[in-house]
Image (spheres, rainbow, N blue to C red):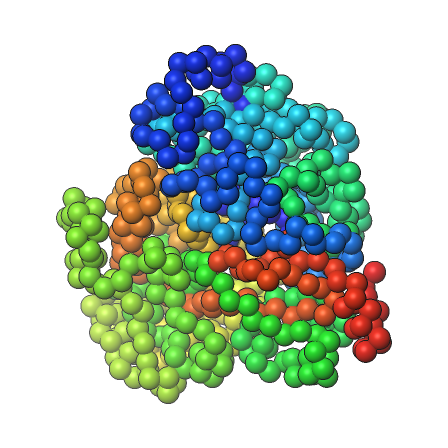
Amino acid sequence: MFRQGKAFFRSIGLFWLAALLLAAAPVRAETGTNDSSEIVHAHAIAMHGAPKYKPGFPHFDYVNPDAPKGGYVKQAVTGTFDSFNAFIPKGNPAAHSAAGLETLMTASADEPFTRYGLIAESVTYPKDRSWITFHLRPEARWHDGEPITADDVVYSFNLLMEKGQPFYRFYYRDVESVTAEDARTVTYRFKTNQNPELALIVGELPVLPKHYWETRDFSKTTLQPPLGSGPYKVVDFEPGRYTVVERVKDYWGKDLPVNRGQDNFDRMRHDYYRDQTVIREAIKAGDIDYYMENQAKAWAQDFDVEAVRKGWLVKEAIHHNRPAGMQAFVMNLRRQAFQNVAVRKALAYAFDFEWSNKNLFFGQYERSTSFFSNSELAATGLPSPEERQILEPFRAQLSPEVFESAYLPPSTDGSGWPRENLREAFRLLYKAGYEVRNMKLAHKDTGQPLAFEMLLRAGGSAFRRIVLPMQRNLARLGITMTIREVDDAQYINRIRARDFDMIVGGWGQSDSPGNEQRAMWGSEAADLPSSRNYAGLKDPVVDALVDMIVTAPDREALVYRARALDRVLRSHHFVIPNWHLSRDRLLYWDRFSRPAVTPDSGTSLSYWWWDEAKAEALAEASGKAPNR
């Protein structure tokens, strides 16, 4: 519901200086040359090409600008929370931790990577994007009435870089300086002009109120909802049980084109539940208004109830075209058991996706084969000439398979007895130095048995049933995989401490990958707690390819470089790929309406609204009053 930039967890030049620059060179449209002396002054900035929406646009195409304001929506969350500070590597932040926080620029949902002014009304930058200046809106205000200033922007950047999640230090490491030129003008200068994405992603950084945080310790968790500036603010909560946000009636930005037709509900509540089984009963009983189902079995079997049959509770799968990224069983390369690539490759043969899809998922899923699944960025078949040109300088450091084909995970006939796959797994394990001793697989030199633990989050019984068949297949090979479920706090702490063998993990991707790839795969990120390099991958070739993605001069180059990275990541075999779905499976009580147009990124409650006529009809037909 709260729109964040590409960077946030799938976040203006001196007037006299600007005048001097503008006098020195003409202001040009987004389609000018690459002359670095040429200065652009614009309402928006696109990664490649020109923004879809021109200056003065009334609203985004996928919203209803006349959507009424009002109503109430109640959702559900599993687990618990103990903090409203989502920006530090401590605590378990609440669902509404980002309520009220805004960024200088905001995204459109129907373009790969374009940012439009939110707190900033316009930007100024040279064609080489070696710096960018944001001009703040004079009407931008915090909820206490204080103006949002350039000092707030500078303070936010420095604070997040010093005390925030490690992610920020990777994402913004090429920022050289950020300077408040005057009260409404802030300039970012970059260490390089070869990182064109930086001009967009610095506009995604959450802007925090300096006058609020300078008297508090930002490095600590807090149960005091922080001061914000956005369309909502937290008005009620109980730790571990619920949070409630309310629309700010005098929100300063309510009439901006980027906000028109969005943030339509007066109140929203998130209730916390121990597991999804209880949530499903709550949505069927009408205690929850809106729910996105993530379990195929439940979608297929759990909602054959009167409310669905009569259309009171709508069950709808809405198609989307957003990249799926990679969800997988992730191996921790820091563990001795997984340091041999042949072992890692062998373990993939024990997961029978075809059997699982048929018997557990009701045929709903597609197998993920790429770190950029469901997008043009995914590598397929043999490398193209353009990909070979990128990869050839690294040939000596790469596995030959990178040049032979794009790795695909093993497939089966779906019978549940993948005998040929297990035979191939055993061949790889024998090559890695393992042999059977007393019905267990052990290394023939050390005698160390091959055993590891699958760590799951408590309440994750859906994954227990998925990994149990894999556990059985591994046992047939003489490998012991224990399954351990722990509560939220333990799970989070163990992931941060890298205290796991294998987890169910994932990396969401955007249509325009960039600096965030460093935190996913970079060697520096491997040893940092809370980075997204869960596997602990350290590969100089990967580092170099990530840098090439970051510096891609155009869309075509970005696509080929992403495909090259995809091939190299797959060749490390540190994941057993899972699956993805190109539809959002939604259940909602028929009190809401949404726009006719769904953007490629999928629908969002941000665009929905309370439909009073539907609510009254539902109440009359079902006898269920709305959750007020």
In the displayed structure, 69 sits above or below 291; it is above
Dividing the picture into quadrants, the one containing residue 554 is top left
Is 49 situated left or right of 163 in this image? left
Q: Residue at x 50, y 39 (%)?
A: 54
Is 466 situated left or right of 547 in this image? right
Compare residues 522 and 494 and report the one nearer the observer.
Answer: 522
In the displayed structure, 581 sits above or below 246; it is below
Q: Which quadrant: the C terminus? A: bottom right
Residue 338 shows up from this direction: no
Is 322 situated left or right of 229 in this image? left
> Could you say where residue 29 lies in the image, as x and y percent from the top left?
42, 31
Q: Which residue is drawn at 79% across and 42% down?
A: 249
> Could you say where residue 279 lies in the image, as x and y percent from the top left?
69, 69
> Could you say where residue 340 lies in the image, as x and y percent from the top left?
27, 59
Dividing the picture into quadrants, the one containing residue 567 is bottom left
In the displayed structure, 472 sits above or below 385; it is below
Q: Which residue is drawn at 56% across and 57% down?
A: 491
Q: Which residue is drawn at 49% across and 81% down?
A: 362
